[in-house]
Image (cartoon, grey):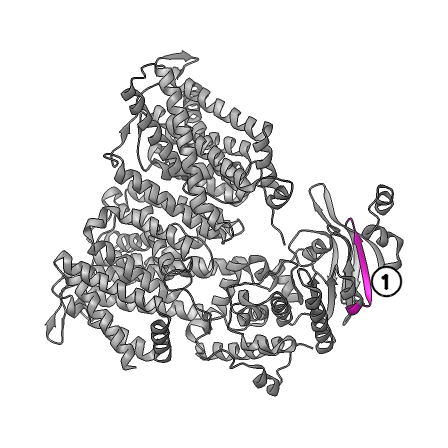
Amino acid sequence: MIGVWAVELGLFVLVVAALLAERPIAVGLTVAAIGILLLAARTSPRLWGWVATAFRTHRAAALAGAAVLALALPFFLRASPYWTFVATMALIYVTIGQGLNVQMGTAGVINLAGAAFAGLGGYTVGLLTVRLGFAPWLAFAIGPLVAMVVGALLFIPILKVRGHYLALVTIAFGFIFNILMNNLEFTGGPQGIKNIPTLRLFGHAFTTAPTLFGVTLPSHANFYYAALAMAALVTWLAWRLYNSWVGLTLNTLRDDEIAAKCSGVSVTRHKLLAFSIGNLFVGLAGAFYAVMVGFVSPPDFDFGYSLVMLSVVILGGLDSIPGVVLGACLLIPLPERFRMLHEYRLLLYGAAIVLMLLFRPRGLWPAGVRRYGLGSPAGSFGAAGTRAEGVGVSR
Amino acid sequence: MPPLEVILQQAFNGLMLGVMYALIAVGFTLFFGVLDVIHFSHGDIFTLGAFAGLSLTFLWAAVGIGNPAVALLLTFLGALVLTGLIGVAAERACVKPLAKAPPLMTLLATLSLGLVIREAILIFYPRGADPKPFPAMLPQGLFEIGGVVIRYENLAILAIAGVAMVLVDLIINRTRVGASMRAVAQDAEAAQMMGVNLNRTVDFTFFLGSALAAVAGILNGLYYSEIHFIMGIMGGIIGFSAAAIGGLGNVYGAILGGLLFGVLQTLAAAFIPRGSEFRDVVAFAVVMVFMVFKPTGILGEKTIERV
Amino acid sequence: MSLFATRGLTVRFGGLTAVDHVDAGVEEGETLGLIGPNGSGKTTFFNAVTGLVPATGEVVFRGAPLPGLEPHQICRRGIARTFQASRLCLGLSVFDNVLIGMHTHVRCGLLEALFRRARMLSEVRQALKQAAHLLSLFNADLVDRGFDPVGALPQIDRRRVEICRALAAQPRLLLLDEPSAGMSPEETVELMKDLQIVREEMPGLSIIIIEHDMFVIEGVSRRVVAFNYGRKIAEGTFAEVARNEEVREAYLGRGSGTEGSARA
């Protein structure tokens, strides 16, 4: 257990050092150190075996440790509102990634309009609060629902067509969304919607710098903690979904639609379910983004971002819930840390996806076998046990 | 109701767009027919074709080839071959290795390859972010017939596109390699047993499709007098849409779908209020209607699903 | 009245008639063998019955008509099947592949998955036990490897998992599409034993089995139907059908003279 915490703490210190380092050489050294450590752990079976076993046996402790460190992060980044903001963006992408992962990873339903669904969530918040005077929290709750419902309306007519048409329809939808937002009057055209009111919790506005334990943090820390709660909630829901009948059913229809049908699965219903849940999560992240930055405009939700969202899932590992978290936490901060790479960002994302798909199609953190959270080692449902109980099959 | 000649004029303009879309769509439909894949970087191959053409015009100017007809011919030939080979390289890199993987993987890989191509043009082509002027290499001038203005340039574009389509038709239906393509499209395994070289056939298909995209790219440059690194996104989506409307796997369907899409877009731009902004919305709405009511397209899709 | 019967079942693909007015049926607890040369419409017959391809004609199962139903609805009525080319999810675990067969009996849905975990987990535990029991009928090792991906198993065990998946649906009628396809003679012998186990454990289950291997057919089914060119050309005991002139021609005589008579 101590070992698990030591590993987590060590990684945390290195990451914070890498983020806050100012001289390029320090940045390079810390990032290289993280890379070398991870690589060493991954290439040495003994080391990796030890780490993997330790984290598996002390899973609760590992999660608790990670939670404490995640909660502590803003204190270490308090000198830099910018990095607090970047960390928050990573958490927003965790939320988006989990949504896309339910669709593409678990159910194999392609969605190339992630940015547009996030935009639906964001624009709904903007329109409802600024144009119609809704309470911010109410608008924030409605945003994701709009993304979900619009997605379902788009999806229902094309449920029966083959997968590549869905790719076409979602791309087309993404462009239509952008064209409409750019040209409609009530969405503010290219300028978008400004001055979206911020959220308040127990009278505390999210724009006021919070003071915790006598330490004043940058105001972005509010959003960091809110995003942490959102990402944790969504990841938790995604984990439960994956480790359930629903996850199994979605996996089956992804792998073999005909076999799924002949096992009694209503393919259309389950595809719709996966698509809707995914868009709900993505829309939630979009609504959050709108509230955080206080405005929405078309370029925030263009096709390029849909591809970035895709990269998060593929890099981390399709169908892998921890993989999505890893993917977002790598892909979002890295180009910010290496500003000289910023120009090459999309090029590198694209190349990274291609290389991942060719050489490591299951991602950096591949999905494991589904154990339904029973935590039981293989064989506990062994033959000996069941023969004694004599569970009957249909006669 | 607008006067007839206005409608005809717009339809003619739409035809210009339509033939370019059709050339892209034929690529999509060929790849799908032969390999059952959607090659999502095809739109960016189209951009690449245009940039290859543009670079070649500079080259010919630099080496002193003054005759516009010769320069034009060499531009086409060079860009065709170059883009065709890049298309084959794309297939070898991103399509063939994933042939056994779920279709989603090919889709994502080619989509990302498109992103790489697009960004590479943006970053590595000199001042790649700006629209690039494309030299006018076709005969200028115009005449009028029944109130419809027709430019010689446009006729030349139609003629070039027409020749390209006829050539493709001849290649597919009259040559050995075309016969191999048709055989693989029907049943790859059986074709192989009958002695068809699968790899060569697939390579050729991607060469042909990509070369057609290069033709479309250069025509696009000649028509609009400029090209831009992001034109492949829309070009690709529209080409795919056109192929889908026509019926994936069917070459004539792709041509029909391309023409239909071009005419539709132009008419929408001309006759719907603020249509130039919403023309893509209208066109895509039509695509969606097709997906709902006739997902196999006008001429039907090849569907082989083994149980 | 038989459990399952078709009357005039016909499947057309364009100009081709793949299944041509077939009348066939199976009694409760009976095993029916389905034979015929390649392309004679046996698999298409299964596909038509399970709703994967559109067909005309009557299909009556447990006294109710099936046509017009979606494949998943037909499964709910109590027909399960296997496929000639295995259709397992190779990346999923052995248990998962069997558990999906229980889909129609699962009570817990999204709500339980997200918010009523205890209820869902007890159902999953029950299902895992049942899966383990089914697997152990054929090969106890499969239970120990229950959380391994199916892709890691040898061919024969994959076939067993597929049969377990079909049995997990607790069907009244089981359609086996050439289970011995791609197996060695030794594995085929094993498979026959497996089928006998199914027969003994589930005496009430009706089975229709497509087989090329006459040894398997003779071993497991008392009654046999023979197909050729989509039509039923013979029906009876194995010995009767094996003696039938038209069947012999369909299998052996493919010369110019005999083909005409086989069509006639």
Q: Position of residue B280 (x, y in %)?
A: 38, 37
Residue toward you, B230 or B295: B230
Asked which secondary structure carries label 1, the reply is strand
Name the residue located 47 percent from the left edge and 57 percent from the top edge.
Answer: A108
Tell me the quarter of the picture where residue A227 sits: bottom left
In the rendered image, the vertical position of residue C215 relative to residue A133, given as above or below: below
Name the residue located 61 percent from the left edge and 65 percent from the top edge.
Answer: C155
- Dot 1: chain letter: C
The magenta-colored residue range is C219-229
Of the residues shown, which amino acid type is indicated by label 1? Gly
In the rendered image, the vertical position of residue C218 relative to residue B97, given as above or below: below
Q: Position of residue B16 (x, y in %)?
A: 42, 25
Query: Which quadrant holds the N terminus of chain A?
Result: bottom left
Name the residue located 32 percent from the left edge and 64 percent from the top edge.
Answer: A325
The reply to whether residue C18 is in sight is yes
The reply to whether residue A67 is in sight is no
Q: Which residue is mark 1?
A: C236
Q: Determine whether, in the image, residue C191 is placed left or right of residue A50.
A: right
Residue toward you, B192 or B278: B192
Label 1 crowd (10 A; few <14 / some 14-19 / many >=20): some
